[in-house]
Image: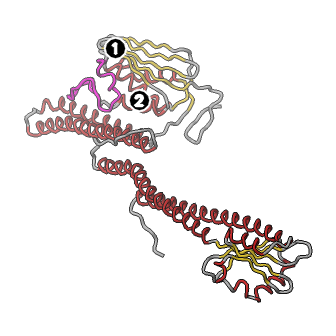
Amino acid sequence: MAKIRFKSIFDRMLFLQCVTVISLLLVSGLGIGYVSRMQGLDMEKELLIEKGQQAEHLLDIGAPQRELEVLTAEHKLLIQVLYPDGTVSAYTDEKWAELAFLSADRTRVSDVLRRSADLPETMERYFSGAAFPVYTLFVRMSGEGREGVLLIHSDITRLNEAFREIGLWTLAICVMAAFLVLFSSYYIAKRVINPFVDMNHIVQCYSKGDFSQRIPVQGKDEASQLGRSFNEMADQLKNLEETRQSFVANVSHELRSPLTSMKGFLEAMMDGTIPPEEHGNYIDIVLSETRRMTTMVNDLLDLARIESGIITVSYEVFDINELIRRTLITFEARISEKQMELDVRFAMEQCYVYADSNQISQVLRNLIDNAIKYSPDGRTLLVSTYALRKEIYVTIRDTGVGIPAEDVPHIFDRFYKVEKAHTPSPQVGSGLGLAIVKKIIEAHGQSITVKSARGKGTQFTFTLEKANTLKRVTDGGRKNGIL
């Protein structure tokens, strides 16, 4: 048997809905017809039982035949009385005269008499072969001194016509209902499927890089919720694409500018434009640019590894105050060179946190390096920790040039620089340090904030989870602690 194939969900939904509803209508129609027929026959049976009881009473009192004929004529019945001696009496309307077999069939009469003792009080039966349908009720006579069986035959043509009329009306109603169901199923299926068709078209546009399309959303049903999710995804994809393009452009610019400068210097030294006695100065510039490019590439690799999840957070309990002290020691020469005043304020002598010490060390180095880099000589560098019930706050504040208010929301973006110059300068970095800082803090499930004003300095504050040195244990090979 060939399998029905559907090209779309719409075809499948429409087919299933129509088959289901039409099947229900068919079963309902058949059920209505059957119940109607059974109720009609039950009513006919009750009528025949009543007339049989009346006929039996008339026979018991020896009523004249005319009264029995009146009884049969009233409802156009045929009443037969079968006696044990084989005689048959019939009381009938003229229309039953054609059915001679009912009175002359001795075999049938003998069969009924033989089984008369086993007959129930009433028994129904259908006879065929007549010009019209016949419904027969057998009633065993129980009067004193009388034995025999009453056969009460009824013409059920009118019942069959009523059944047929009911069937035709039921069929008509089912056909109309089927058309209504077909129309409503088509409409409902279209309403359900159309949003998904639109989504498919718009997703194809997304696959081609066009993120300007949006799904029209109305209502609060599941399709509308899915449409809103698609629109949110499109916004994120658009932002991601813009970020990617900006990232590629920034990387290209950051690499091309120093490479062009280095190429120019080297060519000038080779062709004699720069005299040999000045080669040393320009070689220092080339080396400085090389180091800057190396730092930027390393930062890019670190950022890529953090975002891809290659670098995981290896939790451990350590003293953040001690880590800050060790980090500041590495900047001692630069702090002395700029004659900066160092102000260190710890909430307590030992302040334990639960984090990755290597990554937090990188955060401290980047923030302290920026604070020193963008502070004029003789200013103050403040590093402090503050403990709450579940968190430790680490603050690094300088009194340097500060950040304009319009730049503050963007300083954690990759390659974003307050100083837009791309020429070699001690104060021009790669624009990746703060992006790495934020990614590391977010990977710890913590937050970092910045406050700054032009000419008044900048303050970075990040949080870390406060640790209880007596309860940290190893967790899945990634989290290490002490008992």
Q: Is residue 102 left or right of residue 262?
A: right
Other-residue count near label 1 (Cα within 10 Å), few / some / many at <14 / 14–19 / ≥20: many
Q: Is residue 107 left or right of residue 4?
A: right
Residue 108 against residue 338 in the figure, above or below? below
Residue 371 shown in magenta: no
Q: Which residue is mark 2?
A: 438
- Answer with the quarter of the image where residue 430 lies: top left
Q: Is residue 301 visible?
A: no
- Residue 461: where, in percent of width, then height? 44, 20
Residue 81 against residue 442 in the figure, above or below? below
- Answer with the quarter of the image where residue 213 lies: top left
Give the residue type that dot 2 points to: Lys
The residue nearer to you, when weighing 235 against 174, is: 174
Secondary structure under tag 1 reads strand
**Earlier sequence position, callout 1 versus callout 2:** 2
Q: Main secondary structure of the magenta part?
A: loop
Residue bounds of the magenta highlight: 403-430
Q: Which residue is mark 1?
A: 457
Residue depicted at x 38% and y 37%: 303
- Residue 59: where, in percent of width, then height? 83, 73
Tag shown at residue 246:
none
